């Protein structure tokens, strides 16, 4: 996803050649992808919830749901990371499907937040949409991300790949936990 920074304009105004959502078909197509991003992220978060629940108690989700009730997504990812690393310390060998999983779960949240919290009323004809104000040593800058159909599809595909990786890890986890016959 391409981004650009522009100097802060007083009163957070946007000097854009603004796209009219009703007449610009590209913007309309892009806006329809917001729902896909939200839907895929929700599926990913529900699968993470389930993974935490079975990691806590494989006979009932109730205990896990009590633990994660009210937790934000980032807190769930951190809890799951600690649970997995504890398990990995107790089993021999590497767990390949875990490699990069936590980073992918975090990236999914970053992308979802970018899409959901973008200021869609300030999108230009190139698909650059105002996303946030950055405050750094050099002053304040307005950040715009190019949220096009292609970039939104890429976000959806990354979330799908992360969900598949989580499911692959759960399968590998089950194999690690299954009793092995004596050698």
Image: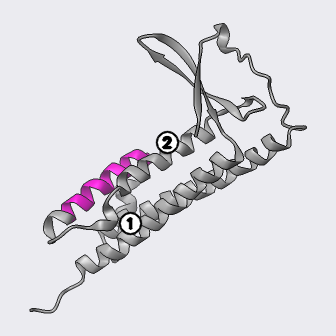
Q: Which residues are magenta?
A: 70-87
Q: Is residue 45 magenta?
A: no
Residue 87 is situated, as x and y percent measured from the top left of the image, at 21, 65
Could one spot residue 32 in this view of the protein? yes
| Dot placed on the residue nearer the N-terminal end, 1 or 2 | 1
* Most frequent secondary structure within the magenta stretch: helix
The crowding category of the residue bearing disc 1, from other C-alpha atoms within 10 Å (few below 14, some 14 to 19, many at least 20), is some
Q: Secondary structure at mark 2?
A: helix
Give the colour scheme shown: one colour
Compared to 53, does 4 lie above or below? Answer: above
**What residue sits 73% from the left and 16% below the top?**
15
User: If the image is split into quadrants, where does the C terminus sit?
Assistant: bottom left
Compared to 139, does 108 lie above or below? Answer: below
Residue 149 is situated, as x and y percent measured from the top left of the image, at 71, 47
Compared to 179, does 58 lie above or below? Answer: above
Residue 172 is situated, as x and y percent measured from the top left of the image, at 32, 75
The residue tagged 1 is 51
Residue 110: assigned label: 2
Task: Please name whichever residue, 83 or 103, is drawn nearer the observer in this view of the structure.
Answer: 103
Q: Are marks 1 and 2 in contact (CB under 8 Å)?
A: no
**What residue sits 72% from the left and 35% below the top?**
127
Compared to 43, does 179 lie above or below? Answer: below
Quarter of the view holding residue 63: bottom left
Q: Secondary structure at mark 1?
A: helix
Quarter of the view holding residue 112: top right
């Amino acid at each position: 996803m391409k981004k650009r920074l522009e100097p802060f304009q007083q009163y957070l105004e946007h000097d854009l050649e603004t796209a009219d959502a009703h007449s610009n078909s590209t913007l309309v197509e892009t806006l329809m992808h917001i729902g896909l991003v939200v839907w895929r992220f929700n599926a990913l978060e529900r699968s993470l919830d389930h993974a935490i629940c079975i990691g806590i108690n494989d006979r009932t989700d109730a205990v896990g749901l009590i633990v994660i009730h009210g937790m934000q997504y980032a807190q769930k990812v951190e809890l799951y990371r600690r649970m997995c690393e504890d398990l990995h310390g107790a089993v021999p060998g590497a767990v390949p499907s875990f490699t990069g999983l936590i980073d992918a779960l975090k990236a999914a949240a970053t992308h979802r937040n970018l899409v959901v919290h973008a200021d869609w009323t300030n999108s230009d004809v190139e698909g650059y949409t105002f996303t946030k104000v950055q405050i750094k040593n050099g002053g304040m800058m307005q950040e715009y991300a190019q949220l096009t159909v292609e970039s939104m599809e890429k976000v959806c595909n990354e979330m799908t790949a992360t969900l598949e990786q989580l499911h692959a890890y759960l399968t590998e986890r089950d194999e690690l936990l299954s009793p092995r016959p004596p050698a």
